Image (cartoon, rainbow, N blue to C red):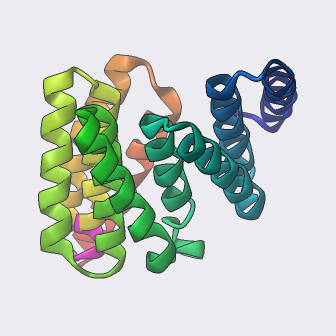
Amino acid sequence: MHLSNLDEASRLFRISLDLAEQGGHDDTRAKALGNMGQVYARQGDVHQAEQYYRLNLELAQRTGNLASAAAAYGNIGSLYLDDERFDAEKALPNIERAIEIYGKLGQEADQAVDIMNKAIVFDHLGRFDDARELYRQAVEVFRRSGLRSKEADVLFCLGYSLEMQGDRRGAVAQARQALVIYKQLGQETEAELAEARIVQWGTASHKS
């Protein structure tokens, strides 16, 4: 999403938040708070994003909306997965809480997103075997649910995991599987990134 689109999304979500607050619609307000957090997260403003996610979490806990609370926990944890701001102590407890709540609610697909994110944390910590098992679980859920875009995301993440371990051929194989799905779904941005990594990892593999 381009910056201009993010600005427009932010404006619309603020209007939605104001209307929800005026009308006392807690579920709508919680969703708007989460959406505002996502806008700031996309802009790279982690502090502001976390503030909105925590407001979302507080409201969800106060109203007993477990699904909204799980989403907020997962969103907070996801802020600390990137290489430049990775923080296991901030990411892992929130992600695990989201997994726990989604499990109780039986929301398997939502739970699988956070299982994938937990695998990313384990990759950063060098727990590659644990990460691989979590990726396997997430892929199975997304395949069973027909969520092919999410399936591709997991395969691509597994590619990154294998590249971190020095298995560039394995990384390329996973990225190729993801690329096929992205192309079938018309996800051009994701397909271009997958193609770039295939070239990068493949070149490195030939040199090693």
Q: In the shown orientation, is residue 198 left or right of residue 170? A: right
Up/down of 157 relative to 106, above or below: below
Which residue is more in the foreground, 129 or 21?
21
Q: Which residues are magenta?
A: 162-167
Quarter in which the N terminus is drawn: top right
Q: In the shown orientation, is residue 26 left or right of residue 65? A: right
Up/down of 154 relative to 6, above or below: below
Q: In the shown orientation, is residue 25 left or right of residue 177? A: right
Q: Position of residue 205 (x, y in %)?
A: 24, 68
> Is 38 one of the magenta-colored residues?
no
Q: In the shown orientation, is residue 2 left or right of residue 124? A: right
Q: Position of residue 46 (x, y in %)?
A: 70, 61
Q: Position of residue 114 (x, y in %)?
A: 35, 50
Whether residue 183 is visible? yes
Which residue is more in the foreground, 195 or 73?
73
Q: Position of residue 154 (x, y in %)?
A: 28, 46
For image coordinates 65% across by 34% down, the residue present is 30
Whether residue 178 is visible? no
For image coordinates 23% across by 58% down, the residue present is 171
Which residue is more in the foreground, 130 or 110?
110
Which residue is more in the foreground, 104 or 201?
104
